[in-house]
Image (cartoon, rainbow, N blue to C red):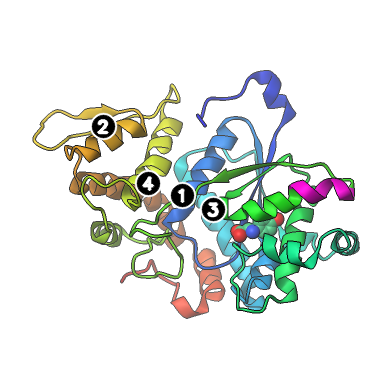
Amino acid sequence: MTARPLSAEKKIRHYHFNLQEVIRGRPHAAYFLPAIKVAQFLSCGCHVKILLADLHGFLDADKAPEEVLEFRAQYYERVIRALLRSVGVDLSNLEFVRGSSYQLSPEFSRDLLRLSKKVSVHGAVKASSEIVKSTGDPCMADAIYPMMQLLDEEYLDVDAEFGGLDQRKTFALANDTMHKMGFKTRAHLMTGMVPGLSGGKMSSSDLKSKIDLIDDEATIRKKVSKAVCAPRTVAGNGILAFIQHVILPFSALRSVDGKAALKVVLKDQTEPTTFTNFQQIVSAYESDVLTPQIVKAIVQKGLIELIDPIRKEYTEDEEWQDIARKAYPDLGATRPQKE
Ligand SMILES: N[C@@H](Cc1ccc(O)cc1)C(=O)O
């Protein structure tokens, strides 16, 4: 998807997207991926609603204990705003909605009961199987979770829902079920699951390798330099994936003509080469003129550029730091994290 604005006629229709965030671990650098997508939606003239799914976070095998939900929601909202500001996009068409702000209403409860008569227990558990952390025997929460996610589309009044590929079973359930409730069936947009910077899925529980959005320059450099990045190998390479999904689209969002451009000095060269798409980068990497050292340096520079304004905002904002302490009491979240 390019960052080119939609035609004026389409703009008036105002698309709604819903980017969901379960309040799990602390947001980290992988969040730039959906942030870039949201930035692209916004720059195309869409109206974006970000659902801070606090009650879902609670339902999901105690990922977020009830007493921290409010603070995590506040922390997420600040981080995501700062993240999008750092990408440099106009936020006037962006809205945050707290799940608990409507999911506890009598109307929602009644719809949930209605929906429970239209979905089989097996179907509901299957729908959430790639999302909730299974603890063996599925509990009722695992079944309630996807049903609430379906109703969210209706209650948020969106035209489309955007999420990772891991949402596909819930999206399939929505396709099969929404019409049975007299609700319209929404479009579902999915991004692939991208390898993390250290290889494997980037996870907020992997504290050592994950790059926090308030890490300082030295820490970012160190973590990126430790990342696994096999020469000539593109598959499973988190550094290249980050260039593909964040650095290149970020450059496109920044440019006047909406086109990506990445200037790089290749091995044994003195003049920079400009890459305009990922395929060119893949070819250069496979032939080793673009080396692991060079691509790591690209990611270090890009991350520092993106994270710097977020960390500055955080360090200057005592209220935010206080929220962080309450949201993540175990992490000593007062200062930008060092290893
Ligand atoms: N299931 C989503 C979170 C979510 C919750 C409620 C929704 O309505 C949408 C999405 C996830 O795993 O991140």
Percent position of residue 66, x then y = 67, 77
Residue where numbered disc 4 is placed? 241
* Spatial CA span between label 3 and label 1: 9 Å
Amino acid type of disc 2? Lys
The spot of residue 333 in percent (x, y) is: 45, 72
For the residues marked 3 and 4, what is the alpha-carbon distance in whole angstroms?
21 Å
Q: Which mark is residue 32?
A: 1
Q: Which mark is residue 80?
A: 3
Per the image, label 3 sits on a secondary structure element best described as helix
Which residue carries the number 2 mark?
A: 263
Q: Earlier in the sequence, mark 1 or mark 2?
A: 1
* Badge 2 or badge 3: first in the primary sequence: 3
Membership of 57 in magenta stretch: no
Q: Nearer the viewer, residue 167 or 259?
A: 167
Compared with 303, 319 (above or below) is below
* Label 1 Cα crowd, 10 Å radius (few <14 / some 14-19 / many 20+): many
Of the two numbered discs 2 and 4 on the same chain, state the one appearing first in sequence.
Answer: 4
Is tag 3's residue or tag 4's residue first in the polypeptide sequence?
3
The amino acid pointed to by label 3 is Ile
Does residue 179 belong to the magenta stretch?
A: yes
Give the quadrant of the C terminus. bottom left
Three-letter amino acid code at the position of disc 1: Phe
Q: CA distance from mark 1 to mark 2?
A: 21 Å
Q: Is mark 2 within 8 Å of ligand 1?
A: no
Q: Amino acid at mark 4?
A: Ala
Left or right of residue 52, residue 331 in this image: left
- Look at the picture and state if 41 lies above or below 19: above
Magenta span? 175-181
Q: CA distance from mark 4 to mark 1?
A: 12 Å
